[in-house]
Amino acid sequence: MPWIGVLPFLWTSLLALSGGADVKHRGCGEVRQAYSAKGFSLASVPFQEIAGEHLRICPQEYTCCTTEMEDKLSQQSKLEFENMVDETSNFVRTTFVSRHEKFDEFFRELVENSGKSLNDMFVRTYGMLYLQNSEVFQDLFTELKRYYTGGNVNLEEMLNDFWARLLERMFQLINPQYQFTEDYLECVSKYTDQLKPFGDVPRKLKVQVTRAFIAARTFVQGLSVGKEVAKRVFKVSPTPGCIRALMKMLYCPYCRGLPTVKPCNNYCLNVMKGCLANQADLDTEWNLFIDAMLLVAERLEGPFNIEAVMDPIDVKISEAIMNMQESSLQVSAKVFQGCGQPKPAPVIRSSRSLSDSFNTRFRPYTPEERPTTAAGTSLDRLVTDIKEKLKLTKKFWSSLPHTICKDDRTTAGASIEEDCWNGHGKGRYLPEIMNDGLTNQINNPEVDVDIMRPDIFIRQRIMALRVMTNKLKNAYNGNDVNFQDTSDETSGSGSGSGCTDDICPTEFEFVPTEAAPAEPDRREDDASSASQNSQSLIMVFSMYIILMLQRQWR
């Protein structure tokens, strides 16, 4: 049939009319220029488009990419993604790293300077009498430092021991005509709570020191946890599915000969939500953690201000010594009644009386004399600064895809919906935007996400945040987290709630961004009752063990 010979000509004409001839002969000049700008060699880059059957990620149409180019650009997309995440998270990382260092330096220097202040002024005021007993005071500050740095120190027991030791030393000084055995002095120390030889100072100081140190240590621990989460989570490598999606989004435009066309904003969001699905799951615990940090920060500004406690601690201890001096006769009489009459000293001691030794009231430093801490920065300024920065980190993990995709270096921008790369060509991106988190990526059209295999490392970070938040809740109520069950219950034993009859912190009722309404804490009789119940349980348990052992013996 004569018209059969015309078919090849008609086919060629149709290809030309449809643009097929233009596609075949489209040059790759722009791609070569953009590819070279990335630092790659042009040796493998074609001058004109070639058939794309070899492509594994990008559309297998006519292309400016070879297999080698696709591999290199795939690695480049992974590197750029890691750099984008690193750059975006830099604020969170630097906030926690720098503020942890600053607070830690401040608290350490505060304790150190308080110890030096007491030593200098007691030497000046009490002279040799203090120097002969200085280890009692030095041990106090040593234990405070050890507690702050994470040592297994029960603050209440440590402070009780300090006052008991001080009473032993003072009792010998006010009764130089007698000699005292170790057993006798131990008997004396048992009368510390009953006689209250130092007045009300030990009780008040215990309240102030315990809750201030608990809050300070826990707050710094919180900064440390936040620092580790921020530093480590971003080291998690993208999955193979994520790398494929990144390549398709960032560099498949190169392979299509469109190196200047940027990804559509919504397309970028779906890719980032798929790649950062595990990180987004941190958001809930992170926000609770930040809220708890902010509440403890408010405590540090107010009733738990460690600077307000440590600066005048030398004055308060001196006041306690004066109270002991003034009540020395009554204290001695009651101790002799309870512990027995001591033996006379074989050698007559110095005739200098205690009144002569303590004839000068303690004079604290003036503001000009008092040493500064952390380069002169006050706690209030430090706390105000960190509170403002912590607030900015809320919802950081869920907003990370949006932060990355709104960068005009990455996408065409939210306002450009047509003239952008949609994963296949230049045009509008139609799929819906996924919600945040791992489980919501089950239908992500861009990233192959296995929702049944959460990242173990990130799950561990989520648990670390949860544990730290609970510690902060306890610290908010003045409870020592190292000596009680770290459940949501705020009752229990420990270094105490820091509550007194007239001063008691608000119980922690966790409402994000707002402090809880005031509610009085438990009184000492509750703690006593809890202690008695605990002892009863121990006795019952001990009897049970004895019975079991007897049965086994038989």
Image (cartoon, grey):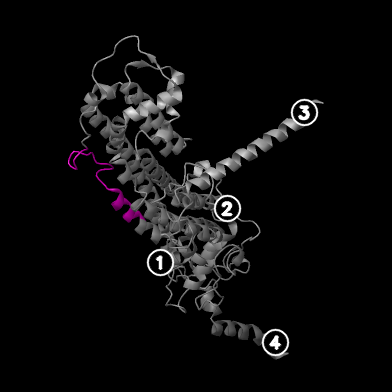
Circle 2 packing at 10 Å, graded few (<14), some (14-19), many (20+), is some
Judge depth for marks 2 and 3 and give the one in front.
3
Which percent across, then down, holds residue 414? 43, 75
Dot 4 or dot 3: first in sequence order is 4
- Nearest to the observer: residue 158 or residue 112: 158
Q: Are marks 1 and 4 in contact (CB under 8 Å)?
A: no
Which x, y percent locates residue 440? 60, 67
Asked whether residue 138 is in view, the answer is no
Rounded to the nearest angstrom, the CA distance separating label 4 from label 2 is 69 Å
Point out residue 285 in the picture as x, y percentages from the top left corner: 52, 57
* Amino acid on which the number 1 mark rests in the picture: Asp
Q: In the image, what residue type sits under mark 2?
A: Arg
The mark that comes first in sequence, 3 or 1, is: 1
Sort mark 4 into few (<14), some (14-19) or many (20+) by Cα contacts within 10 Å. Answer: few
Mark 1 sits on what residue? 407
Residue 459 is marked as 2
Q: Given this view, does label 4 or label 3 mark the residue nearer the observer? A: 3
Residue 524 lies in the magenta stretch? no
Name the foreground residue: 232 vs 338. 338
Residue at 53 percent of width and 68 percent of height: 270
* Secondary structure at numbered mark 4: helix
Q: Secondary structure at mark 2?
A: helix
Q: Quadrant of the C terminus?
A: top right
Task: Name the residue type under label 4.
Answer: Ile
Above-or-below relation of 158 to 519? above
The residue pinned by badge 3 equals 550
Asked if 50 appears above or below 368 in the picture, the reply is below
Q: Which residues are magenta?
A: 364-386
Q: Amino acid at mark 3?
A: Gln
Which residue in the protein does label 4 denote?
A: 4
Is there a contact, CB below 8 Å, between mark 4 and mark 3?
A: no
Separation (CA) of disc 2 from disc 3: 47 Å
